[in-house]
Structures are given as structure tokens and as C-alpha cells.
Amino acid sequence: MVAKIISGKEVAKQIREELKAEVEKLKETHDVEPGLVTILVGENPASVSYVTAKQKTAHELGFHSVQDNQPENMTEHDLLALIEMYNKDPKIHGILVQLPLPKHINENKVLYAIDPKKDVDGFHPVNVGKLMIGEPDYLPCTPAGIQQLLVRSGAQIEGAEVVVVGRSNIVGKPIANILLQKAEGANATVTICHTRTKDMAFHTRRADILIVAAGRPKAITADMVKEGVVVIDVGVNRIGKTPEGKAKLCGDVDFEAVKEKASMITPVPGGVGPMTITMLMMNTVRAAKLAAEAA
Ligand code: GUN
């Protein structure tokens, strides 16, 4: 079997078109523009490029978007005060503090300060807890994007054996919880593997859907998967440069070999990556809608 390639670029484009229409409708019915602020402390080059991409997409969708750049030496106290200001700003529906933060600032303290209703990253413990008890509000963006990729590609999720490799708070744990829910696009049987798992291949070979966020290039090889598996590769590993000087990327899955056995597989780049920003936009539109309806 040679796999169908799941294009995150295409699915993200489709969702953005849907969001554009929703934004127009929200303007007409409630005179509200979804408002997103991205707060960047310092000038970490990767963070600058992520935040720029988020703002560009927000502009394209017709959001009220604010990029708030702060100096590297900003105090924790001042950052908390800034968040409080945006918590109270009725034009802002989503607050995103780009991570990582400088070492002198306590990341959790900052994330906990964001109003859970404006937590479009889905990182606040209230939103993490809501997902855990089956009443999700804002889902973290990368796992939400993975679920959309699976649903929109027609993967059979209900009853499937899903194996997740990686137990991070940003991907592994939340995607396991999302697909475990008693809900449409979920109802899977989920196993999480991690660095202390005894026999990784024993688990991955059983997977109908394999989601890999291991942070290690080619951690999953063809002998570790079964024929017909659906593979979602969350890995982004930099492995040198292209002739044009751009970063050359590869995933956590040996794509060329595994695609010969899988029924569907995401590429890197162009798989999960494009979905993350799109889901941030989806969360922001939802936050704006809920705020407008509550007003
Ligand atoms: N840094 C890398 N990924 C993310 C993300 O999804 N959200 C935030 N806030 N910071 C990040």
C-alpha cells in the first residue's frame, strides 16, 4: 500500500475560508472583530518568526490584531500587569504570550494570569481541566489541528487503537485526552508511549492511528508500523540547510519508508505545522463569538 498524503496546507486553507465567512458574519450581526494580541518578550528569532506568522494570518482573516513587543529585560511584574490590561480590554478576545519566556520570568505564573476565556492557546489549567472532565472549551492548537486533520481526511477514529508517542503537555497528553472523549471525532482507545516505555514497537505495531511527537528524527521506522496505519507526524527537526539557505526539516517518522505501508500520512513540512496557527484563529473567533453573545 502507498499512503495518501494528508495535506495540512490544504486542510488549513479550507478552515481559513470557513473562518473568513464567520468573521464577516460576526461583523454584520454583532459589529465585532475578533481581537488577538500576541505578546513577545525579547527577540528569539524562532519566536519572532512564529509571532509574525500568527499576526499575518490574523490580518488576512480580518481580525483586530495587535503585536505587543516587549524588551528581554521586562520584569515579571510588568508582564503580569500587561496581561491584566488585556484581560480587561473588550476589543481583545484572545491573548497569546509567545513561549519560551526569558529565564527570570515564571512561565506558569504568566500563563495562569491569562483570563481562561481569552486563553486561545488552551494552556491555562482551567482549560486543561475542562478537557480532562469532558467539557472542553479552548483546545490547545496543535492537538486540535491533529483532530481536524484526522476528521477531515475521513480517518476512522471511533473504536480505533490510537497510539501516541510523546507525553508533553502541549501535544502528547492533550491529543490523547481529545481522542479519548465521548464525542464525535473521538471515542478512540488510546495508549501513550514515552521515553520509559519498555517495548515501543510492540505498541506502535498495534496502532490503527499513530501520532508521533517524540522530538527525535526518524524515531519511527517501517518495521514499527502495521500495514494500513494512519500516521500523524508532529516532529519538526532541523537537519541542515537547503541549497537556498532555508532550514531543511524532517519529522519524527521515516516518511519515505513508512509511506509504503501506511494508508494515510502527514508530510513534514506541510502536515501538522500549518494547522497550528489556523486553530489559534479558530479559538479566537470562538472567543469573540462567545463574548459577543454574552454582551
Ligand atoms: N511557542 C512554541 N509554540 C507555541 C505555542 O503554540 N504557543 C505559545 N504561546 N508559544 C509557543
Image: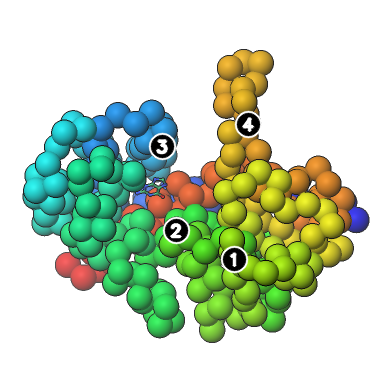
**Badge 1 is on which residue?**
196
Alpha carbon separation for disc pair 4 and 3 = 19 Å
Give the residue type that dot 3 points to: Tyr
Residue 199 vs residue 40: left or right?
Answer: right
Alpha carbon separation for disc pair 3 and 2 = 16 Å
Tell me what residue is drawn at x 17 percent, y 67 percent. 295
Alpha carbon separation for disc pair 1 and 2 = 19 Å
Give the residue type that dot 2 points to: Ile
Q: Establish whether ligand 1 lies closer than 8 Å to the Cβ of label 2.
A: yes
Residue 164, given in percent of the width and then of the height, sits at: 62, 65
| Dot 4 and dot 3 residues touching (CB under 8 Å) | no
**Badge 4 is on which residue?**
239
Q: Mark 4, mark 3: which one is toward the viewer?
A: 4
Q: Secondary structure at mark 2?
A: loop
> Which of these two is toward me, 198 or 106?
198
Q: Mark 4, mark 2: which one is toward the viewer?
A: 4
Alpha carbon separation for disc pair 1 and 3 = 32 Å
Q: Earlier in the sequence, mark 3 or mark 2?
A: 3
Q: Earlier in the sequence, mark 4 or mark 2?
A: 2
Tell me what residue is drawn at x 52 percent, y 79 percent. 181
Kindly identify which numbered label has been placed on residue 170.
2
Q: Residues within 10 Å of mark 1 (few under 14, many from 20)?
A: few
Q: Establish whether ligand 1 lies closer than 8 Å to the Cβ of label 3.
A: yes
Q: Earlier in the sequence, mark 1 or mark 4?
A: 1
Kindly identify which numbered label has been placed on residue 45.
none
Does residue 287 appear in the picture of this structure? no
